[in-house]
Image (cartoon, helix red, strand yellow):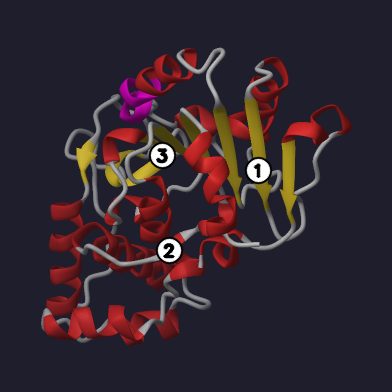
Amino acid sequence: MKITEIQKTIEDAEMIVIGIGAELRADKIIPYDSEEIKAYYEKLGMKQYQHVLEEAKDKEDFAYLRELYYAYYIQTQKISTIYDSLAKVLEGKNYFIITSNTDDLIYSSSLDAARIVAPCGTRRLFQCSKGCSKNLYPAKELILAKLEEFELTGDMSRIRCGKCKEELIFNIREKENPANYVEEGYLSQWGNYTKWLQGTLNKRFLALELGEGFEQPSLFHWPFERIVYFNQKAKLVRVHNKLSQIGEELKERATSVPISAIEFLG
């Protein structure tokens, strides 16, 4: 089954919420070693990306640099991917997207950024690794400065906090230290999302779950089920290569699609 095969379900829905999970992570759509990324840095006059990729397999400092190169590429390019296939299907619809991914590739697509919330964080912002403040810092220019320094001098030092001189890290909720996550980066958009959800009551509503599995079930896996259970006009489509199962209580208004989200959108 492809997304085009549920076109009528999409057309009939007055409101559509889409949950996007790990099957649609950026590195599964655009590999680190893609020729497009290599060509991009060659065009910028940066020659070290291939070397960084090779060394990143077993060296932490190079793995750090690889993430900077990758994040900068995504943040500076309008990249045509399967997210644009989703945007085409949703054109003209009242939709909102919640993603558990933190790579920001979705923002490089033609989807409306004002209709996307990423509660687990973003690589477009930095925060202090030690939490000396709740400040968030735009990442793009800081990343570029670090990459240019590395290309010129070979300096592999980390980007530092201007207040306390500890390392700046991406504004992402880490499983190892979730309490350190500065939530202010997404809370405003989260408010927009929850307000939008309040308007779904008694509407013809579609919840489309793409590739989440069970990595972050409290984010939208369980919430989608609750919404569909209580709204008799709602439907659920769950897409995942291995974990697309639907509970008995929802089977009459839910569809399991046991393929990867990439294949579904492709």
Q: Nearer the viewer, mark 2 or mark 1?
A: 1
- Quarter of the image for residue 44 reads bottom left
Q: Report how far apart the C-alphas of labels 3 and 1 lie in the structure.
A: 25 Å
Q: For marks 2 and 1, give the CA distance.
A: 18 Å
Residue 189 on the magenta segment = yes
Q: Residue at x 43, y 54 (%)?
A: 86
Q: Which residue is mark 2?
A: 82
Q: Which mark is residue 121?
A: 3
Assign the magenta stretch its main secondary structure: helix
* Mark 1 neighbour density, 10 Å: few (under 14) some (14–19) many (20 or more): many
What segment is highlighted magenta in the picture? Answer: 184-190
Element assignment for label 3:
strand
Between disc 3 and disc 1, the foreground one is: 1
- The answer to which of marks 3 and 1 sits earlier in the sequence is 3
Counting from the top left corner in percent of width and height, residue 9 is at: 57, 41
Q: Is residue 234 left or right of residue 13?
A: right
Q: Is 118 one of the magenta-colored residues? A: no
What's the amino acid at mark 3?
Gly
Identify which residue is drawn at 32% across, 40% down: 92
User: Label 2: how many residues lie within 10 Å, few (<14), some (14-19) or many (20+)?
Assistant: some
At x 73%, y 37%, the residue is 254
